[in-house]
Image: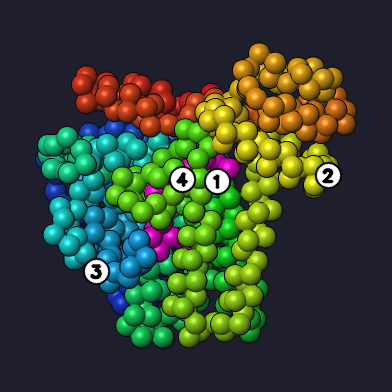
Amino acid sequence: MTNPFLTLPYESALESLGNEFFDPVVAASFPRHQLRFRNDALLPELGLRADQVKDEDFVEAFGLFEGVRPFLALRYHGYQFGEYNRNLGDGRGFLYGQVRGRSGELFDFGTKGSGQTPYSRGGDGRLTLKGGVREVLAAEALHRLGVRTSRCLSLVETGDALWRGDEPSPTRASVMIRFSRSHIRFGTFERLYFHQQTAQIQQLLDHVIEVYYPELEPGADRRSRFFLALVQRVARLVAQWMAAGFCHGVLNTDNMSITGESFDYGPYGFIPTYDANFVAAYFDYGGRYRFGNQPAICRWNLERLQTAIASVIPNTDMEAALKTYATEYADHYVTLMLRRLGLGDTIELDPVLAEQLISQTLLCLSESQIEYPGFFATLRQNVNQGWRQSPGLILEKTDLGNADWEQWRTLYHQILARLSPTEFNAVESTLQQANPLTDLLRPRIEAVWEQITEEDNWQPFADLVQKLQTGA
């Protein structure tokens, strides 16, 4: 049988722009090729069924890298912890290929850990197996939580022994295939701006609009409308992170996608309790990318992009677009938090009461330090019709403690008491959809990794992936 991944109708959308944007690269050779994860949930988007694809097909296409078209390491710069760095680019991965999904969207297969490139900066171009495992888990958890995210198609263990300062070494190595909407970053434009390549900025921007923003009709102000659309996508993405309790960890401009999609999960963390000062990256000593600072940082990153593309989009238009960021973020965050409380789009709410409920929820979570994902899972597990009858019946068996929680119960009850039985059934359904029962807090990840390192037991990992995907 022919390997279905090697016969997909690949497109050369990025490659057709010319070699100013990338460097051709050759993948490394590896001593071992063992498939550790295959994401069958993504196969339908490629027009494939799980029973049509063998494990060996994943390894042949995304581990051996034999007989496949040239790969592209993209060029980009970026602001890293606020400082401009021009010594960047794809240093341990490349664009494997682009393919249009059944939805009509163009998707990228991007590698991580596939060897050295011109931008490896002395590194080995490899990915630790633990890093691959962590990214698989992050992407599946975020997808289930409704975050617009890249996902992992496959993870292959390669047999290399790697030395790292932040893991017990030697440690195992892997190659991951990331399935995302684009390989183009804010930093891709920043590099062109640094080299004063205005024509290439215009070329790349028009490509981005044509491919990734097809809803924008042609017109003299199309580029300005693109920036407005990007601002709003980024604002909604950050709201998704915040409602999910997710801290990306390293929001440099080279980690910001031009499509407004979340990707590249290194030292991420889900907050165990509501804490605006939670820091995911151990090397973020000043807390620049702390949980509560993510909305402000992403706006700052948009401002850096604004500077990079000001030669082709009027600054006045981009300033006007940026003014919509705060409202777009706040509105979307309210919507998402209401969903986590079971109050979906079909239920009409008094806006003032809704915002009071969210503010009180966050106040209580912050002061009590009750587990953030656990609180919403508890809502899902305990919801019942009695909640419409009396505030005292809301989470009656849960020790919430102080008077702030009593005020929260009162506010929540005011909303629920106005609902019909049919509307309350919708609350129960929304709680089920919005609140997975399985969290991805650090101890759970470490427990899975411990089984892999000590016993080479991958079943807990597989079980966790399944729970994250289903919300169980």
Sequence-earlier tag: 3 or 1? 3
User: Residue 171 got which mark?
Assistant: none
Q: Quadrant of residue 314?
A: bottom right
Look at the numbered disc 1 and give the secondary structure of its residue.
helix
- The CA distance from mark 4 to mark 1 is 13 Å
Residue located at (46% from left, 45% from top): 277
User: Residue 350 got which mark?
Assistant: 2
> Is residue 87 toward the left or the right of residue 267 in the image?
left
For residue 192, above or below residue 182: below
Residue 112 position within the rendered picture, expressed as x and y whole percent measured from the top left: 28, 50
Name the residue tied to disc 1: 242
Look at the numbered disc 4 and give the secondary structure of its residue.
loop
User: Residue 87 got which mark?
Assistant: 3
> Is residue 438 toward the left or the right of residue 220 in the image?
left
Q: Are marks 2 and 4 in contact (CB under 8 Å)?
A: no
Residue 363 position within the rendered picture, expressed as x and y whole percent measured from the top left: 63, 38
- The CA distance from mark 2 to mark 1 is 23 Å
Residue located at (78% from left, 33% from top): 411
Q: Are marks 4 and 3 in contact (CB under 8 Å)?
A: no
